[in-house]
Image (cartoon, rainbow, N blue to C red):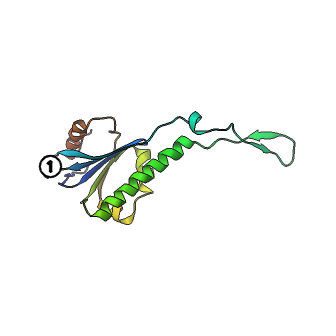
Amino acid sequence: MPHLRIRTGDWVIVVDGRKALLLENEGDDEILNLKTREVREHADAPNRLLNSDKPGRVHESATSSRSSVEQTDRHEDEERAFIAGVAARLEEAIAAGGVKGFIIVAPAHVLGLIRKGYSASVKAAIRAEIERDLTHLPVYEIEQRLLKWEEGRTT
């Protein structure tokens, strides 16, 4: 595992499909001191509430039979939109000039989705991507996990 120091002013973005913590290291390069800059959440409504109609039907052209059409997974659409919003927020932070670098902490499928929204300036500012789901932890425990990761131990 690569050795990484989270520098003063670096943002640590801890995100999953429904919650994002934007944290800033206000400590120095040796002592991690993460402070919450922003918390973003979206309602995680189940598909049964997001889909209002029953599945559609398709008439076969050669016969008189009908088949149902699979419904769109609106929950997935909501998750994608939320993650795209987080990527857009990172772009805003870069444009404002207050961010030195990003460390992204997310589950694998979220990393795949958020990468699609990276602009060139965000890509250049990313110092590391860590494949972990830490959104359910308090900030002090996220710090502890990141310190272990910095030292090369598995978190």
Residue 43 in percent (x, y) is at 46, 39
For label 1, the crowd category at 10 Å Cα-Cα, with few meaning under 14, some 14 to 19 and many 20 or more, is some
**Taking 25 as reference, is 90 left or right?**
right
Residue at disc 1, secondary structure: loop
Say which residue label 1 marks.
27
123 versus 37 height, above or below:
below
In-front residue for pair 61/94: 94
Q: Amino acid at mark 1?
A: Gly
User: Percent position (x, y) of residue 24?
Assistant: 23, 50
Residue at the spot 57% in from the left edge and 35% down from the top edge = 49
Total marks in image: 1
Q: Quadrant of residue 109?
A: top left
Answer with the quarter of the image where residue 136 lies.
top left
Left of 106 or right of it: where is 37?
left
Q: Position of residue 100 (x, y in %)?
A: 24, 60
Q: Which residue is painted at 29% across and 63% down in the image? A: 96
Which of 20 and 142 lies nearest the eye of the viewer?
A: 20
User: In this image, 21 relative to 112: left or right?
Assistant: left
Quarter placement of the C terminus: top left
Percent coordinates x, y for residue 111 in the rendering: 40, 49
Instruction: Name the residue located 18 percent from the left edge and 54 percent from the top edge.
Output: 7
Left or right, residue 68 beside residue 154: right
Residue at point 13% right, 46% down? 31
